[in-house]
């Protein structure tokens, strides 16, 4: 087990985040945000602000920065601020004040008077449900409504009506913010070679593409540098407003500009996870075999319809075997900040509903919840023919039940003094995906090797994984491998999103290492080289032939080279036509609910996961632990309170609750390790997101076991348990 290479730097303050870059002549921008949820800005009086001490410039929709919306293949259109006078949510960026110091910019921003022609705002998700719209397809080839029916079945309603046992209920989940520790920020500088931007992001090469598009410049002249990222979770996928504003202002002023959001602004000037409402009906035979699943979902979205939480689509792409399935996905446009991907988009809130419903079905059938799930274990995604490449969910449940002491669970919970104690379980699934990635491997004459790609490590452990896969592929010790990451000047790849980075980058490292070793052995046997005309092999970092060997560094020196490099790309291909791919897991939670105060506390938790090969157990466990804790957070703590006027009432870390140490007991994580080389050469299936899937349901199910109270919305609060 290897500790995170970047760990010491991060905990000692040595890691340089975007905002830590202090450049000569740098000035500071403060973002101005709207104080209405819907309307047109009719005037902005910036006279006082412009005259305030230290102020250099004030930008607004009336005196804008030169930009246009960014267009990229991955994200489509990304909004950039100050290009029009429309306000569609409270807290929308509408101005930028640039001054010599941050404090001067902030003080001046307070002097700006904004006039609005206000319009009625729709901010209540519940009120918007009746006017919901059909959601766009979440990805190519998938419709917003999917129905799969067995031969002779006319409709999902008929299938449910014919089912001996039916449970039907409505569940809801709250709007959440990623609330990463590092607020969104950027430092931008224009040099003779072009633009350099230091800004935390999930992929340097994608940020460079978005900035180039927005600023209408050649992508070759943009360099994005983000070696360290203080958390992202989907909230730093798109380029942030800070990067767009800093880059455009630095161009206008010909000075380096730094822009940092306040914590409160992070909640509105970035994006959130949507709220969801989900109606589920499950039909089953007396023996627990599912006969029908209906899952209708509503997701909040912003007026730009930027994103929909694909909760129903999770049910149709991974979960249970059923002959009859109908899902629908609708969206409710509101005057709220943009919505976007957040860790396990779709599956996180979707599994709260589906896995709560499965618990309710188990109770209706008087059946053990694990047995019910295993009885409906699927060999392929519902309604699809391509079998899972590798699935060991049953083993996860078997090991988990044993490790957790599930056999001691009583259907009615138990009491321990003044505490009501219950156990709950839930399944976790998240699709195994990978993206094309390109990696350059460079062998150096000091016997070290670089492996580089332009992605990012937002705290996931990618630095460490790259060094391990590099060491294995080059057959050398890990401390001789130097990973390079977080710089768009490197070959494109390594997006940290969709739980894809290890499979994507790892496969490309293997390909590039094979190539560089071929090139090295060819060099060794070339004319005039030490192994001229011999059949050269490679092992243990050395070239061998004719009973002699040299390290690659020695060979490079002997041939007058300082380095030898190879670049290779690995991308998904034919395997997608042969199998379906997913990671799987079983979550276990024990809760204690106080008999009199009704506080709910998680006292034990265990997750057992089938995520293919685990490259590094320590960083993998950290990822899963973080996800499980986030699941507890979703269940018991997190949720944005949206006032009628569209303002977030709790947009700060004092009132937007996330668990602290005292809320979280020891977290037990176990992996069953079945490398999935049908998916990619590395055999890793991805585990960045699955840790959070199922957790909220496991908590709610445990609370039901302890108290007999079924709570169908999260976060669950004390009032729900009275
Ligand atoms: Mo993520 S929600 O995989 O960026």
Image (cartoon, rainbow, N blue to C red):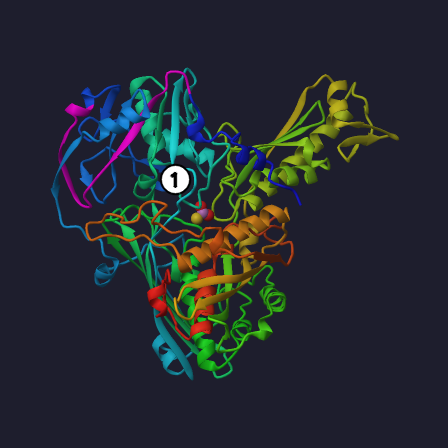
> 31 and 8: which one is in front?
8
Q: Position of residue 467 (x, y in %)?
A: 63, 37
Q: Residue at x 35, y 39 (%)?
A: 263
Q: Residue at x 26, y 52 (%)?
A: 642
Camera sees residue 422:
yes
Q: Quadrant of residue 31?
A: top left
Q: Position of residue 147 (x, y in %)?
A: 38, 68
Camera sees residue 216:
no
Q: Is residue 555 above or below residue 68?
A: above
Relative side of 587 to 652, left or right? right
Q: Which residue is mark 1?
A: 238
Q: Which residues are magenta?
A: 23-49
Relative side of 190 to 330, left or right? right
Q: Residue furthest right?
A: 547
> 108 and 196: which one is in front?
108
Q: How many marks?
A: 1
Q: Secondary structure at mark 1?
A: loop
Label 1 CB, ligand 1: below 8 Å?
no
Task: Look at the image and tell me in which quarter the N terminus lies.
Answer: top right
Q: Position of residue 424 (x, y in %)?
A: 50, 68
Are there few (<14), some (14-19), or many (20+) residues within 10 Å of tag 1? many
Relative side of 251 to 226, left or right? left
Q: Position of residue 10 (x, y in %)?
A: 53, 35
């Amino acid at each position: 087990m290897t500790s995170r290479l970047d760990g010491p730097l991060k905990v000692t303050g040595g890691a340089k985040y975007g905002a830590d870059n202090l450049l000569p002549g740098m000035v500071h921008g403060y973002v101005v945000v709207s104080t209405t949820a819907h309307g047109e800005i009719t005037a902005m009086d910036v006279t006082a602000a412009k005259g305030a001490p230290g102020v250099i410039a004030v930008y607004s929709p009336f005196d804008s920065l030169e930009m246009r919306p960014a267009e990229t293949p991955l994200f489509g259109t990304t909004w950039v601020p100050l290009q029009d006078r429309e306000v569609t949510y409270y807290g929308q960026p509408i101005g930028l004040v640039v001054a010599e110091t941050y404090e001067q910019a902030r003080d001046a921003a307070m002097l700006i008077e904004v006039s609005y022609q206000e319009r009625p705002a729709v901010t209540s998700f519940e009120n918007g449900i009746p006017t919901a719209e059909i959601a766009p397809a979440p990805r190519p080839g998938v419709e917003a409504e999917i129905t799969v029916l067995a031969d002779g079945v006319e409709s999902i309603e008929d299938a449910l009506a014919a089912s001996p046992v039916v449970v039907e209920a409505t569940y809801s989940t709250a709007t959440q913010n990623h609330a990463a520790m590092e607020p969104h920020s950027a430092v931008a500088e224009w040099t003779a070679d072009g633009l350099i931007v230091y800004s935390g992001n999930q992929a340097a090469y994608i940020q460079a593409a978005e900035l180039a598009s927005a600023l209408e410049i050649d992508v070759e002249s943009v360099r994005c540098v983000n070696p360290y990222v203080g958390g992202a979770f989907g909230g730093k996928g798109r380029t942030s407003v800070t990067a767009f504003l800093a880059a455009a202002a630095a161009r206008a002023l010909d000075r380096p500009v730094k822009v940092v959001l306040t914590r409160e602004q992070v909640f509105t000037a970035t994006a959130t996870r949507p709220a969801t409402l989900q109606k589920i009906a499950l039909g089953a035979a007396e023996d627990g075999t599912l006969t029908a699943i209906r899952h209708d979902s509503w997701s909040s979205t912003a007026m730009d319809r930027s994103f929909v939480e694909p909760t129903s689509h999770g049910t149709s792409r991974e979960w249970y075997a059923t002959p009859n399935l109908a899902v629908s996905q609708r969206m409710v446009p509101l005057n709220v900040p943009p919505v976007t991907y957040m860790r396990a988009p779709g599956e996180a809130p979707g599994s709260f509903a589906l896995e709560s419903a499965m618990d309710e079905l188990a109770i209706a059938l008087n059946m053990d919840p694990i047995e019910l799930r295993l009885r409906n274990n699927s060999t392929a995604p519902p309604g699809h023919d391509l079998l899972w490449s590798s699935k060991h969910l049953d083993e996860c449940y078997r090991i988990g039940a044993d490790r957790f002491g599930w056999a001691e669970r009583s259907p009615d919970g138990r009491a321990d003094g003044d505490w009501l104690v219950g156990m709950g379980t839930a399944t976790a699934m998240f699709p195994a995906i990978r993206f094309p990635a390109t990696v350059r491997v460079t062998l150096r004459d000091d016997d070290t090797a670089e492996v580089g790609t332009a992605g990012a490590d937002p705290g996931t452990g990618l630095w460490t994984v790259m060094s391990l896969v590099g060491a294995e592929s080059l057959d050398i010790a890990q401390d001789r491998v130097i990973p390079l990451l977080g710089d768009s000047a490197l070959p494109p790849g390594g997006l940290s999103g969709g739980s894809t980075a290890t499979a994507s980058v790892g496969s490309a490292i293997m390909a590039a290492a094979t190539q560089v070793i071929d090139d090295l052995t060819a060099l060794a046997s070339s004319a005039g080289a030490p192994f001229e005309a011999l059949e050269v092999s490679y092992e243990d970092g050395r070239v061998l032939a004719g009973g002699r060997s040299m390290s690659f560094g020695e060979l490079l020196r002997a041939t007058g080279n300082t380095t030898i490099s190879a670049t290779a790309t690995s991308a998904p291909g034919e395997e997608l036509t042969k199998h379906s791919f997913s990671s799987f897991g079983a979550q276990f939670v024990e809760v204690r609910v106080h008999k009199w105060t009704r506080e709910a506390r998680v006292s034990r938790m265990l997750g057992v996961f089938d995520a293919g090969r685990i490259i590094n157990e320590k960083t993998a466990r950290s990822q899963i632990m973080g996800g499980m804790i986030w699941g507890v957070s979703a269940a018991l703590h997190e949720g944005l309170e949206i006032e009628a006027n569209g303002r977030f009432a709790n947009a700060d870390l004092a009132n937007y609750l996330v668990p602290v140490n005292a809320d979280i007991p020891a977290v037990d994580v176990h992996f069953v390790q079945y490398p999935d080389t049908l998916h990619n050469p590395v055999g890793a299936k991805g585990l960045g997101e699955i840790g959070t899937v199922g957790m909220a349901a496991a908590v709610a199910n445990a609370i039901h076991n302890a108290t007999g109270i079924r709570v169908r919305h999260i976060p669950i609060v004390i009032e729900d348990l009275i």
